[in-house]
Structure formats: structure tokens, C-alpha cells
Image: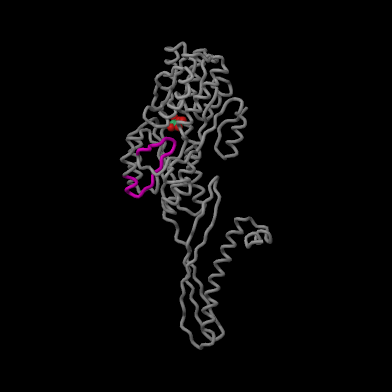
Amino acid sequence: MGEIEKLSFNRKISRREALSTAAKVAISAVVAGVVAGVGGYYAGSLVAPPVTKTVTETRTETRTAGAATVTMTATETKTVTSTVTSPTTVIRTVTATAPAPTKPLKIGVIGKSVHPYWSVVDKGSAKAGEELKMAGMDITVSFWVPYKEDVPAQLKTMDSYIAEGYAGIAVAPSDPDAIIPVIRKALDAKIPVITIDTDAPKSDRLAYLGTDNYMAGVAAGKAMLEALQKMGLARPGGKIAMGTGSLTARNSLERMQGFKDVVEPAGYKVLEPVCDYEDAAKALELAAATLAANPDLVGAFGVYAYNGPAWARAVEEAGKVGKIAIVEFDATKENIEPIKTGVIYATVAQRQYFMGYYGVKLLALMNQWGWDSALKFYIPRYPANKIFDTGVDVVKKENLKAYYEEVVARSEPVDWTPD
Ligand code: BGC
């Protein structure tokens, strides 16, 4: 039985408690050893000068947080003073300095619009912050989104985080080209920057953490073909509309491309996207207008979180339920309800909680371990690969319950029930 197992066994304490007890035992052993050595050396002499020795010892602790195991190393310096007053009596004074508190870190997370989708990212970021605080870090996590798509406001927020000396920034750029200079500026100021939700691969961002949007678009295209088939709407030359919130953000462009690459070769005609710039009210207006202008539409694709619900409402209001196949993205309550009622066939659910959660943890760890070590820890084959794929789930009425259980098991927040 190893030292740790023995401790847990004898005193019925948790493994975590055992680990810290084992660490304490190790510290006292080191200190005791040094003092005994000093005492031994002076034993026999009548008067001995006080001796001061400095011992540096390193402790390693392993914690498990979600899918990641984080190893943290703390260095403690102890000063040991030993004074010998008689040949046989040794008086020892041991002073141990607690490790210096970590320097306060501010991490900023910048999203794209006010929507329940982003509230989940916020929750993931906050959770990571809480866990890091409990592990002894002095950390503040701020989360910011503009009301709707707003490139200048995102750039301004980046600038103010740089000026305030933030220790890391996770940003979802609505315009991957416009963000390039300010990312460079942050890196020059030694502030690590990663992208989440939507990438800016031409920038110098250190990594992207989020959905593989092209493949997610392919998944949406496949779900659309299945829906058309099952609903008896499959027909060569059938028209499919797309509603999106951005014509610049890469996630929007990649999703639409992936989608088209599946449905066009199958003979469908995909209309030019209608864009609402992440304004949900505008999305509904555009959906209704598109339906009115295209009475022969067979399908509609909702590219951003609120686009699916907008198509669903427009289809219901036009009395066309069952006549238009709808496929959407994301899994907030407003996305799931129309799946339950059968108005929407499928959604490609992102795991945005982890974009916030791992985004903050990665940036915090970069401050502790250095950028490269932390990035290599989170991303296999870094820097050849700079992508942390958070994955998606394709959800339909038939697997809604299984998906719900999965989400709960992964500790993602959920604001709906499957029944
Ligand atoms: C996208 C985000 C977008 C959100 C709300 C999600 O599908 O990934 O970029 O901001 O929808 O519009």
C-alpha cells in the first residue's frame, strides 16, 4: 500500500485530504531532516553560533476539473534557524513563509450579442473563475457582449482590456479581419488572446476553442436532406432559404458553406442568405418576407441561435407547418420547444458552455505555466494544431431525451426539459 492509500485507509479520509496530508508530512520530514543535521553537527561543542539554513522545496498537486487534469506546482521557501545552547539541548526555531499570493489576474470574455446562447458561455466562464479561486488564484472573470452584432464595440472593448492590463482575452470576432490589429496589440502587450465560437485564423490568436463550423454546417445539410425525405418534400430543384446573423463572421460563412456543399449536389437550390446582424426581431421579419416571396420553398436553415425559432414562427404564422423543413443551430429553450412540437426537424447543438469554461482555464493556466506549456497541455500537437474542437450534438425529437441526459451528465446548464 502506498503512502497515500495508507493514509486514506487508516483514517478514512478522502484522497484529496490524504494528498494534502501527505504533502504536509513531506514538508515536515524535510525540515526535520535539516534541523537534525544541524543539531548533530554541533552536538558536543559548548557554544555554537546560530545557524540559518534555507530550504527550498517543491510540491506538486494534481486536480481534476471536468475533462482536464491540471497539475499545479507551488514553490515554498522555508528558513530554518537552529541555536545550540548546550552540548545536549537543541532549541529549534522554524519559520515557514507561506507562498506569496498569486498576482491578481483579470480575464475578459467577449461575445457577439445578447442571447441565451451567450448566457451559457458566461456561465461556463464564471464557473471556471470560481474553481480557480477555490484553487487559490486571485482571479476576476468579466464577460461582455454587445446588444447585437457590433464590430467597432468589440474592438473598443478589446482595447480597454489591453489598457487595463488584463491577463488574457477570449474573443468571438464578428469580423475576423477587423480584429487582426487589436489581437496583435494585445499579444505585444504580453496579453494572451484566443478566439472562441468563431475563429480569426489570419490573425495571430494563439488558439481557437469552439465548434468546427464547416463540419457542423455539413451536419445541418445532412439533417435537411433527411427532413425533406421524411416529410415527403424531397424534390429536385426545391428551394431552400438561409437566415443568418452575420455576413463576415467565419462561423456563419463556414456553416452556410458546409450546408450548401451537402444540399446542392443533392439537387436543391439554396437562396442567397438573409442577414439580420444578430437582431432577433429583424430575423423574424426577414423570415416572414422570404416565405411570402417564395411560396415554393421546401426548406429553411437557421444559421444562428435565434434564426431557427424565427423560421418556426414565420412558418406557423403562414400556416405552412409540415410544408417546409427547418433545420437550425443551438439548444436553448426557444430552439428545443419547436422540436418538441415537430415544427423544427433538427438542431445542431453547440457546446458553448465549454468555450467559456475551458477558454478561461486555458488563459489562466497560460499565466501560470507560460503560454506554450499551457497550450500544449490543452491542445494535442500544438502548435501544428491550434484548434480545440468543443464538438456538437445533432438533436431531433427522437433523441431529445438522450441528449438531455447527456447535457446534464456533462454539467452543462439547461433551461428546458425533454417532456
Ligand atoms: C453562434 C454565435 C451567435 C449566436 C447568437 C450561435 O449559433 O455560434 O456566434 O452569436 O448563435 O446569435
Quick check: 264 above or below 170?
A: above
Quick check: 110 above or below 362?
A: above
Q: Residue drawn at (55%, 77%), measured in percent from left and top?
A: 36
Image quarter of residue 290:
top left
Q: Is residue 169 visible?
A: no
Residue segment shown in magenta? 185-202
Quick check: 407 above or below 304?
A: below
Q: Residue drawn at (34%, 42%), measured in percent from left and top?
A: 183
Residue 228 lies within the magenta run: no
Where residue 188 appears, as percent x and y from the top left, is: 32, 48
Where residue 120 appears, as percent x and y from the top left, is: 50, 36
Q: How many marks?
A: 0
Q: Residue drawn at (68%, 61%), measured in percent from left and top?
A: 10
Q: Is residue 215 left or right of residue 342?
A: left
The quarter of the image holding the C terminus is top right
Residue 195 lies within the magenta run: yes
Residue at the extreme front: 265
Q: Residue drawn at (35%, 38%), measured in percent from left and top?
A: 202
Q: Is residue 13 visible?
A: yes
Say which of 115 and 379 sits in front: 379
Q: Quadrant of ligand 1?
A: top left
Q: Is residue 118 left or right of residue 189?
A: right
Where residue 72 appears, as percent x and y from the top left, is: 50, 55
